[in-house]
Image: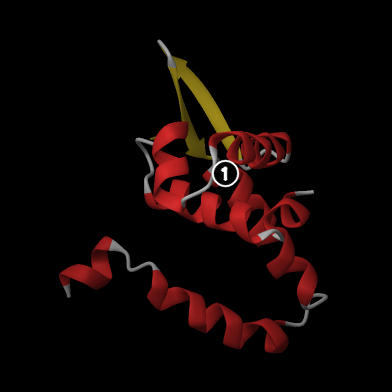
Amino acid sequence: MALASLAQSTRLDTFKLLVAHEPEGLAAGEVSKALGVPHNTLSSHLAILSHAGLISSTRYSRSIVYRANLVCLQKVIVYLLKDCCGGRFDICAPLMADLVPCCPTKETVDV
């Protein structure tokens, strides 16, 4: 369900925007403005992402702040990586090598 919800471009853009604004999240109005999507249209997209478990929301007075559920994203990615190669490391090794530079650890930054 998570992948299906991200298959639509506005939802993918919304999710990417929310990931970029972790851990603070963004109010629905800010998401709408940043993406140029009408509020009622965005509301439908947010509901689908929420139903898929990819985002969560918290109400603060009159606004709702949305946040990406990075744990859900991690589970989807790990599932795909473990399932894609059927246990054959040689198939997934190049993919894993490509992922390492995207997220440097403190140790690699300090070197």
Query: Is the residue marked by circle 1 packed among few (<14), some (14-19), or many (20+) residues within 10 Å?
Result: few
Q: Is residue 10 above or below residue 95?
A: above
Name, please, the residue furthest toward the left: 110
Residue at image location 72% in from the left, 41% down from the top: 52
Q: Which residue, given by chain and number where applicable, does mark 1 sit on?
A: 71
Q: Is residue 41 above or below residue 11?
A: above
Name, please, the residue furthest toward the right: 86
Relative image position of residue 67 (x, y in whole percent): 48, 36
Name, please, the residue furthest toward the front: 38
Q: Is residue 43 above or below residue 7?
A: above
SS at circle 1: helix
Q: Nearer the viewer, residue 79 or 15?
A: 15
Q: Is residue 19 above or below residue 91?
A: above
Residue at image location 21% in from the left, 70% down from the top: 109
Residue 102 can be seen in this image: yes
Q: Nearer the viewer, residue 55 or 100?
A: 55
In the displayed structure image, the side of residue 87 where residue 106 appears, left or right: left
Relative image position of residue 57 (x, y in whole percent): 53, 27
Circle count:
1
Residue at image location 62% in from the left, 43% down from the top: 54
Asked which quadrant contains residue 24, the reply is top left
